[in-house]
Image: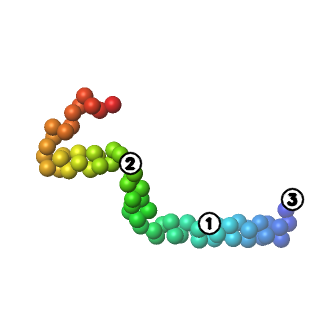
Amino acid sequence: MTTNTSLEERMAAVEAAITQIQEEIAPLKSSNWLQQISGSFKDEPAFEEILALGQAIRRGDESVLDPSEIE
């Protein structure tokens, strides 16, 4: 059976660990997700094609939606 002192020490260690974890994840919560991914597709060959297809669809050109090309 554990003594009160060791239980108190263990609780203090758990509380300290929780505080450390909260401090580590705090910057992740406050950062802008868009800034984190900005530029991540710059070297992706299909990205420009995806942008062009999205613009065509927004203009109403649904002919770019060829169901036979969907895998």
Q: Position of residue 52 (x, y in %)?
A: 23, 48
Mark 2 = which residue? 44
Q: Residues within 10 Å of mark 3 (few under 14, many from 20)?
A: few
Q: Name the image quarter holding residue 46.
A: top left
Q: How is the image coloured?
A: rainbow
> What's the residue type where badge 1 is placed?
Ile
State whether residue 4 appears in this view. no
Q: Which mark is residue 5?
A: none
Looking at the image, residue 27 lies above or below residue 39: below
Mark 1 = which residue? 21
Q: Earlier in the sequence, mark 1 or mark 2?
A: 1
Image quadrant in which the N terminus is located: bottom right
Image quadrant in which the C terminus is located: top left
Q: Earlier in the sequence, mark 3 or mark 2?
A: 3
Q: Residue at x 29, y 49 (%)?
A: 48
Q: Are marks 1 and 2 in contact (CB under 8 Å)?
A: no
Q: Residue at x 73, y 71 (%)?
A: 12
Q: Which mark is residue 1?
A: 3
Looking at the image, residue 57 lies above or below residue 23: above
Q: Residues within 10 Å of mark 1 (few under 14, many from 20)?
A: few
From the viewer's perspective, is the residue at label 3 or at label 1 nearer?
Answer: 1
User: Disc 3 versus disc 2: distance between alpha carbons?
Assistant: 60 Å
Question: Callout 1: helix, strand or loop?
Answer: helix
